[in-house]
Amino acid sequence: MELINHTGLPLLQFSHFKNVAGLVHGVTTRKGGVSEGPFFSLNLGTQTGDDPQRVYCNRHKLLSHLSWNPSSVVIPKQVHGKNVVLITKERWDNDSAPHGLVLSGVDGLTTKETGILLMIKVADCFPVFLYDPAHVAISLIHAGWRGTANGIIAQGIGAMRKSFGTKPKTIKAGIGPGIGGCCYEVKEDVREAFSKQKSDNAVWKIDADKKIFLDLKKAIFLELIKCGLNKNNIEVASECTSCNPDLFFSHRREKGQTGRMAAVMGLV
C-alpha cells in the first residue's frame, strides 16, 4: 500500500484501486486526530474508552478529508462473526439516521449503491477490500481470526455473487494492514478452529519454546484463492500493526487499551 498525506491526514491506499474512477478507499493510521493518551490521535472507535466527542471529531476530520457527507456512512458494530449485509437504497432510506447507519452484529458490508461509504474499524484484525469491476460493486470485510476461521471471506464473496452476479475470478482484492505472523502468538484453540477449515500448514509457525504464531494475512490470502480469486488480483499490505506503534493502533501490543483505525470504501 502507498501512504498518501496531502492534507495532514495520512491514508493508506492500494495501487490497483487508487486510480479506479468512482472508487473511494483507504485505511487510516493513528495520525491526524485529536484524541489523547492511548488513543492518540486519530481514534475512530467509540467503544474504546475514549471521549466520544473526540471520536466524532476524528470521524468528521476523516469524512471531510474524503469530501463525504457524514450522514452517508455505514458503520457496523463488529462482533468477530461472519455476517455480511447487503446495503441497498431501500434499506438506506428506511434505516439511516443523520449520522449514518449503524448495524449491530455485522462484520461485512456489500453494495453497488453510489454515495454510501462503508466503514469498518480495525486494530490488528485485517480489513479486506473486494471490488467487482464488471458489476461495479464492492465489499468491505472485517477479518479477525474468528471470522476468518468461520468463513467470512467466502461469505462476503458469496454475497456479491448472489446480489450482483459477481464472478470471483474478476474480483480485485486488497488485504490491508493487520498483525503479522511475527507478532501474533495464539493458543491451541485458535489452531483447532482453523483445522476445521483445513487451513494450510504454511500459516503456522511454532518456535523453539513451542509458542504458536498465526500468519492471519496468509490465511486470508489463501482463503481468497480458495474462493476463486486470481492471485495476481490480490494486493497485500506489508505493514504489521503490532510492529509499528508510531503508525498504527494495536490491540495486542497495547493489551486492549488503544484506539481503532478505519477502513473505508465507497462508490461515487
Image (tube, rainbow, N blue to C red):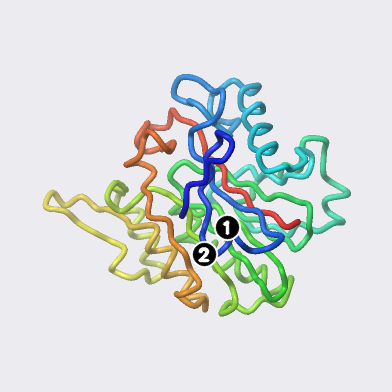
Residue 57, placed above or below residue 157 = above
Residue 62, placed above or below residue 199 = above
Residues at marks 2 and 1 touching, judged by CB atoms closer than 8 Å: yes
Q: CA distance from mark 2 to mark 1?
A: 7 Å
* Residue depicted at 79% across the width and 39% down the height: 71
* Residue depicted at 38% across the width and 50% down the height: 239
Farthest residue to the front: give it.
Answer: 6
Label number found at residue 82? 1
Farthest residue to the left: give it.
Answer: 208
Q: Earlier in the sequence, mark 2 or mark 1?
A: 1
- Asked whether, in this view, residue 185 is left or right of residue 22, the answer is left
Q: Quadrant of residue 173?
A: bottom right
* Residue depicted at 84% across the width and 56% down the height: 89
Crowding near the residue tagged with mark 1, few <14, some 14–19, many ≥20 C-alpha atoms within 10 Å: many
**Which of 9/39 is in front?**
9
- Asked whether, in this view, residue 4 is left or right of residue 256, the answer is right
Provide the residue designation for mark 2: 151
Secondary structure under tag 2 reads loop
Residue 246: x percent and y percent? 38, 33
Secondary structure under tag 1 reads loop
Q: Quadrant of residue 83?
A: bottom right
Residue 205: x percent and y percent? 23, 59
Name the amino acid, label 2: Gly
**Which of 53/7 is in front?**
7
Crowding near the residue tagged with mark 2, few <14, some 14–19, many ≥20 C-alpha atoms within 10 Å: some
* Residue depicted at 75% across the width and 63% down the height: 112
Residue 265: x percent and y percent? 64, 53
Q: Quadrant of the C terminus?
A: bottom right
